[in-house]
Amino acid sequence: MMITSLANEKVKYVRSLKRRRVRYREKRFSVEGLRLVRDAWEAGIIPAFVFYEPKWRERPEAEALLSAMEAAGVPCFAASEQVLKAMSDTVTPQGIVAVLPFPDTEVPARSDLLLVLDGVRDPGNLGAILRVAAGAGVGRVWLAPGTVDLFNPKAVRAAMGAHFRVPLAWGAWDRIREAVRGHQLWLADVSGERLYDEVDWCQPSVLILGGEASGASRRATGLAMGTVRIPLAGGVESLNAAVAAGVILFEAVRQRRRAGVNGLTAPGP
């Protein structure tokens, strides 16, 4: 049986997840496309249910994924292109939509490289930062008040599966302060007093990254032990938040690899 009606209760439920308050009430969000759904599945995240377009299922990789989910008892529903388009957040439906629980990513035993995002409001930037954090092996990313919703559809797409690879958390500054106790805290700032590569990132460390427009909040500034900057050529005022995160976090990775911290033993340049 193919679902063709937008009045179907499950279809209406998926569409309701476009609203932030519904996502957090239900503790669920939706993802689209083979790559994201497969990344979630391979990370051990079991969808509540899935919609797919029959023609899309004819692809071997799509059939393999859907068959594995059906064998595990995941409800998978064939749906018309019109229905998928109504549930999609993109212009062109990607053949599959899955409803997922908020990920509960396991925190490493030693989370000694952490990232705090303070007022990052662009969902595309947030997603890109999460990709960087996942690639750098960050132990946990904290979202401070004023930061865009972690499960904003644009952020989920831009993160390209990072939601399923890096531990994520959000909360008030008092909760963040407790979580980062015992770490050195550095705030990225275009006018920082120290260069980013002068810091000893082999110690348990936290990088605080402020918003693109307004910069760091008073609470972030008060929590940090100091500020770091990336030197830029004349005429360039600042870098995109995701680029800045990548530059600083991978300097930390480079230092840790050279020092053999946390098993990173391959010598780097």
Image (cartoon, rainbow, N blue to C red):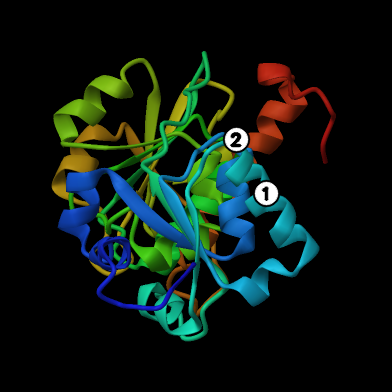
Please provide percent x and percent y for residue 230.
52, 56
Identity of the residue furthest to the front in this view: 1
* Observer-nearest of 190 and 32: 32
Mark sitting on residue 179: none
Q: In the figure, 265 relative to 142: above or below? A: above
Name the residue carrying label 2. Answer: 137
Name which residue type carries label 1: Ser
* Observer-nearest of 22 and 216: 22
Please provide percent x and percent y for residue 216.
25, 53
Name which residue type carries label 2: Gly
Q: Which is closer to the viewer, label 2 or label 1?
A: 1
* Observer-nearest of 192 and 158: 158
Which comes before the other along the chain, label 2 or label 1?
1
Q: In the figure, 181 relative to 167: above or below? A: above
Quarter of the image for the C terminus: give it.
Answer: top right
Residue 144 horizontal side relative to residue 130, left or right: left
Name the residue carrying label 1. Answer: 67
- Whether residue 150 is visible, yes or no, is yes
Q: Secondary structure at mark 1?
A: helix
- Whether residue 248 is visible, yes or no, is no
Q: In the figure, 94 relative to 136: above or below? A: below
Q: Secondary structure at mark 2?
A: loop
- Give the residue drawn at x 41%, y 74%: 88
- Give the residue drawn at x 55%, y 45%: 40
